[in-house]
């Protein structure tokens, strides 16, 4: 596998980031990712307190090996009231990189760069990509229409080619990679790395329920649907009987309130809170209310494996 600007930026062996997954990503997964020669990232929101976040960073710093790298994901819009304190702790402790999502990364870039921390920004279109490049982002995470969780609207080749033609910083493709051939395809489009999440849900190191892991084995890409009922922003989930029962569209009350500029922010925050609680219960407890977030790349998940084995299937 060729050297790219991503491998050089993070000093990793392979141009792969284990994507940050809410409730799924943990230090054990990232440590194994680093040992396997890739980067790993954890959502800061996976930790309820700042002390827990600080302890996780310290554990990863102690466990870091050459050829691997670690970072944290920050939700940088107003729905995350913990954002500024999370950023402060991350900068105080020091990490290799931060991935920003769902908002302006301006403050994050400025404060992270003071500590020599790289910042990669999730984007779904050229307009936002150019904005984050102007703000000083080190790389762009190009979230396409095959991504798990919050996805974009453009196909991988279209988005990658659009961004590589119009941006000068590295493009990291997110979505649509479940095997080595698909990884190589993204690189052939011009991406300098890939961000992969759903493949790692069914890993031994993930702390989610066996039911969640087995669902990634049993269901396929055809079973992935987009719902508005988790965060208020379209999000991909496995189309379980429970998801079919509750539907994937906002309620009529939410649609009406979302048209009110003054109330829209609060409605989204309430929906985010309710949706995240439902997702957490499904991921960590045995419940009939199964709202399992995943992307179409679970098509390639045939069994529950270790992180090391999953990486090897991607690169060897």
Image: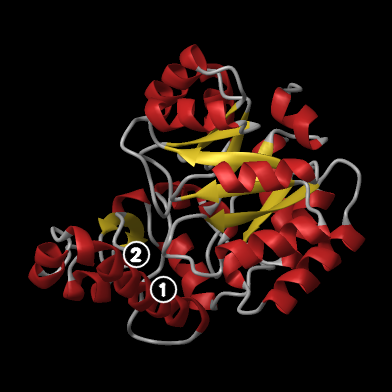
Asked if the residue under mark 2 is in contact with the one under mark 1, i.e. CB atoms within 8 Å, the reply is yes
Find residue 169 and report its horizontal and vertical position in percent.
61, 23
| Residue sitting at the far front | 262
* Residue assigned mark 2: 231
**Picture residue at 47% right of the left edge, 25% below the top:** 130
Q: Residue 158: horizontal and vertical position, in percent?
A: 38, 22
Residue 304: x, y in percent?
Answer: 60, 63
Q: Is residue 13 visible?
A: yes
Residue appearing at x 57%, y 56% in the figure: 74
If the image is split into quadrants, where does the C terminus sit?
top right
Q: Which quarter of the figure has residue 219?
A: bottom left
How dense is the environment of label 2, judged by Cα within 10 Å: few (below 14), some, or many (20 and up)? many
Total numbered badges shown on the rendered structure: 2
**Looking at the image, is 281 positioned above or below residue 115?**
below
Residue 196 visible: no
In x, y percent, where is residue 109?
A: 63, 42
Mark 1 = which residue?
276
Tell me the SS state at disc 2: loop
Per the image, label 1 sits on a secondary structure element best described as helix
Query: In this picture, is 93 found above or below 285?
Result: above
Nearest the camera: 81 or 60?
81
Number of the label disc, if any, that sits on residue 60: none
Looking at the image, residue 208 lies above or below residue 296: below
* 48 with respect to 284 (left or right): right
Position of residue 90 in the picture relative to residue 291 (left or right): right
- Classify residue 208 by image quadrant: bottom right
Marks 1 and 2 sit apart, C-alpha to C-alpha, by 7 Å
Q: Residue at x 66, y 59 (%)?
A: 87
Q: Residue at x 61, y 33 (%)?
A: 137
Counting residues from the start of the chain, the first of labels 1 and 2 encountered is 2
């Amino acid at each position: 596998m060729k050297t790219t600007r991503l491998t050089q930026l993070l000093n990793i062996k392979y141009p792969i980031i284990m994507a940050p997954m809410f409730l799924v990503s943990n230090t054990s997964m990232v440590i194994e990712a680093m040992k396997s020669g890739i980067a790993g990232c954890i959502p800061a929101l996976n930790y309820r307190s700042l002390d827990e976040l600080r302890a996780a960073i310290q554990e990863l710093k102690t466990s870091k090996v050459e050829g691997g790298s670690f970072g944290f994901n920050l939700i940088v819009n107003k729905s995350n009231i913990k954002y500024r304190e999370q950023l402060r702790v991350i900068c105080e402790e020091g990490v290799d990189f931060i991935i920003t999502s769902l908002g302006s990364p301006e403050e994050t870039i400025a404060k992270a760069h003071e500590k020599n921390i790289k910042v990669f920004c999730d984007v779904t279109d050229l307009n936002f990509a150019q904005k984050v490049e102007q703000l000083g982002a080190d790389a762009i995470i190009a979230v396409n229409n095959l991504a798990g969780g919050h996805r974009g609207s453009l196909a991988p080749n279209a988005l990658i080619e659009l961004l590589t033609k119009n941006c000068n910083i590295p493009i990291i493709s997110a979505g649509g990679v479940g095997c080595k051939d698909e990884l190589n395809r993204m690189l052939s489009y011009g991406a300098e790395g890939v961000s992969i999440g759903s493949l790692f849900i069914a890993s031994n190191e993930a702390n989610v329920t066996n039911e969640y892991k087995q669902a990634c084995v049993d269901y396929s890409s055809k079973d992935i649907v987009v719902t508005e009922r988790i965060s208020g922003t379209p999000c991909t989930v496995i189309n379980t009987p429970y998801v079919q029962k509750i539907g994937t569209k906002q309620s009529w009350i939410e649609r009406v309130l979302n048209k009110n500029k003054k109330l829209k922010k609060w409605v989204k925050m309430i929906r985010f809170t309710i949706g995240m609680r439902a997702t957490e219960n499904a991921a960590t407890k045995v419940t009939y209310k199964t709202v399992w977030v995943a992307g179409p790349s679970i098509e390639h998940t045939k069994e529950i494996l270790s992180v090391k084995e999953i990486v090897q299937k991607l690169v060897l």
